[in-house]
Image: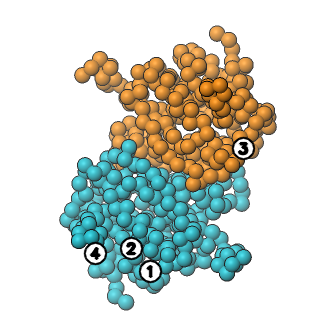
Chain colours: A orange, B cyan
Amino acid sequence: MGKRAEKAAGKPKALVLCSGGLDSTTVLYHAIREGYDVYAVSFNYKQRHAIELAFVRRTLEKLGLVDKWTVFDLDFTQIGASALTDASLPVPQGRSTAEMEGSIPISYVPLRNTIFLTYAAALAESKGIQDIFVGVNVLDYSGYPDCRPAYIESIEQTLNLGSRYVDDPTRKFKVHVPLINKTKAQIIEMGRALGVDYDLTWSCYNPRVAGGRVEACGTCDSCTLRAKGFAEARKR
Amino acid sequence: MGKRAEKAAGKPKALVLCSGGLDSTTVLYHAIREGYDVYAVSFNYKQRHAIELAFVRRTLEKLGLVDKWTVFDLDFTQIGASALTDASLPVPQGRSTAEMEGSIPISYVPLRNTIFLTYAAALAESKGIQDIFVGVNVLDYSGYPDCRPAYIESIEQTLNLGSRYVDDPTRKFKVHVPLINKTKAQIIEMGRALGVDYDLTWSCYNPRVAGGRVEACGTCDSCTLRAKGFAEARKR
C-alpha cells in the first residue's frame, strides 16, 4: 500500500461534483478538509463552456486527485431548449442580479442536476461511496429549480430508493450541500479560508477565443455573479 | 395541418419509455388506447441486447410513430458493475423464477431507471409533455429497487421539484405505471386485448448470432420470465 493509500485507509469516501466553477471547487476543498477520501466527477455535456473541464483538471492536478476523477460524456443537445447547449439560443448578456431573480433563466438545462446527481450516485454506488457533495446554492441564482432545498431532499430520497442501498441497512446516500444558503461572497470567503486557488476556476457561460487565448465574456449572468462575489467578499 | 396532426390536436401528449420488450410495448399500446398523442423515447446504453432497439423501431413503424421517437445515446460502461453493460460479467443462465426472487440481480444497472426517467422528463419538458408512461412492474422481478411503488412516487416528486414545472401551477409530471402490480401473464393478456404484436418484441438479455440471425438465448432471467408469462397467459 503506497503512502496515499495508507492515508486514505479508514477515511470515508466521498464523491464531489466538480464543474470547475467557484462553488464546486470550494466544495471540493471543503470535503477534503472534512476528512473524506475524495473522488471527483464531472460532465462533458457539449456545453458552450466545456473549457471549464480544463479548469477542473488544473485544480485536481494541484490536489493530486486526477486519478480519482471520472468525466461522463453526456449529450443534452437532443433535449435542447437551453442556451448552454443550443447554439441557436443566445446567452443573456449584461443583466443585473436583480434582473436574474424570480424567473428560470434561459441557461437552465431541463433536469440537469437530476441527471448529474443520478450519474454521480450510480458511480458512487459502484465504488461503495455514500457521501455526495454538490455546490448548489439558492441565494444568488434562485431561478434554477434544481438548486432548492426541497429538491435536494427529494433527490436524496429518490437516489436511495432507486439504488442497491435501499436493501442495505448499512449504506445510504447523503447529498451534502454545504453552500446552499451562502452568497457568492460568503462562498469566496469560505474558499479562501480553505486555500482555494480561484485562478484555477472558471465561471463564464460564453467564453470566446481571442488572440489564441480563451477569455471570459464578462457580461453573462455567471460572470456578473462572479464579479459581484469578489467585489463583496471581505479582503484577506 | 395533415390528417394525423388534426387527429392529434386536442389530445394530451404522452411520452412512453420503449425498451422493445413485452412490458413497454404493452404500455405503448395502452397509452394510445387511453387517447394520448404518443411520443416514444428509448436508450442506447451499450447494452448487450441493443438489438431491442430494432424491435422498438418495428413496433413504432407498425404504429406510424417513428417520427415521434427519440433515442438517447448513453454510456453506462464507466459505471460498470452490471452484466448488461460489463462484458466481463456473465449473464445468469437457467435460474428459476424462485431463484430470481429476493435479491438484486447482477443484471441490475445502478440507478438505470432514474437516469432513464430523468432523460424522459427532460425531453418531455422541452415538448410540454406532462404524462410519462413506463412499464415497470414489481411482481415478477422484485429484485430491482427502481421498479417499486415507493420509488416511483419519489421520482415523480423529484422530477416535478427539479424541473421548470415546479413554478408552473398548470403543469406537473405524472409517472404512469399501469403494469406495476401485474404478472407477466396478466401483461400479455392485457396486450393481446390491445392488439399488441408480441412477435415485434424482444426480451433476451444475452442474444447470440447464429446462422446470420440473432437469436434469444432462452435461458437468461428475462427469457425465462417471458416464457413463463406466455405459458401462464390465457389463450385467446
Q: Secondary structure at mark 4?
A: helix
- Residue depicted at 49% across the width and 75% down the height: B61
Cα distance between the residues tagged 2 and 4: 13 Å
Q: Splitting the image into 4 quarters, where does residue A9 fall?
A: top left
Rendering coords of residue A47 (x, y %):
58, 41
Cα distance between the residues tagged 2 and 3: 43 Å
Instruction: Depth check: give the residue in front, B44 or A25.
Output: B44
Number of numbered discs: 4
Amino acid type of the residue tagged 2 in the rendering: Thr
Amino acid type of the residue tagged 4 in the rendering: Ala
Cα distance between the residues tagged 2 and 1: 9 Å
Residue to which mark 2 is pinned: B201
Q: Nearer the viewer, mark 2 or mark 4?
A: 2
- In primary-sequence order, the first of circles 1 and 4 is 1
Cα distance between the residues tagged 3 and 4: 53 Å
Dot 2 surroundings within 10 Å: few (below 14), some, or many (20 or more)?
Answer: many
- Residue depicted at 29% across the width and 53% down the height: B83
Amino acid type of the residue tagged 3 in the rendering: Pro
On-image quarter of the C terminus of chain A: top right
Residue to which mark 1 is pinned: B196
Decide: marks 2, 1 in contact (CB < 8 A)? yes
Amino acid type of the residue tagged 1 in the rendering: Val
For the view shown, which residue lies furthest in the front direction? A211
Q: Splitting the image into 4 quarters, where does residue A101 fall?
A: top right
Chain ID of residue with mark 2 = B
Dot 1 surroundings within 10 Å: few (below 14), some, or many (20 or more)?
Answer: many
| In this picture, residue A225 sits left or right of residue A63 | right
Residue to which mark 3 is pinned: A90
Dot 4 surroundings within 10 Å: few (below 14), some, or many (20 or more)?
Answer: some
Q: Secondary structure at mark 3?
A: loop
Q: Nearer the viewer, mark 3 or mark 4?
A: 3
On-image quarter of the N terminus of chain A: top left
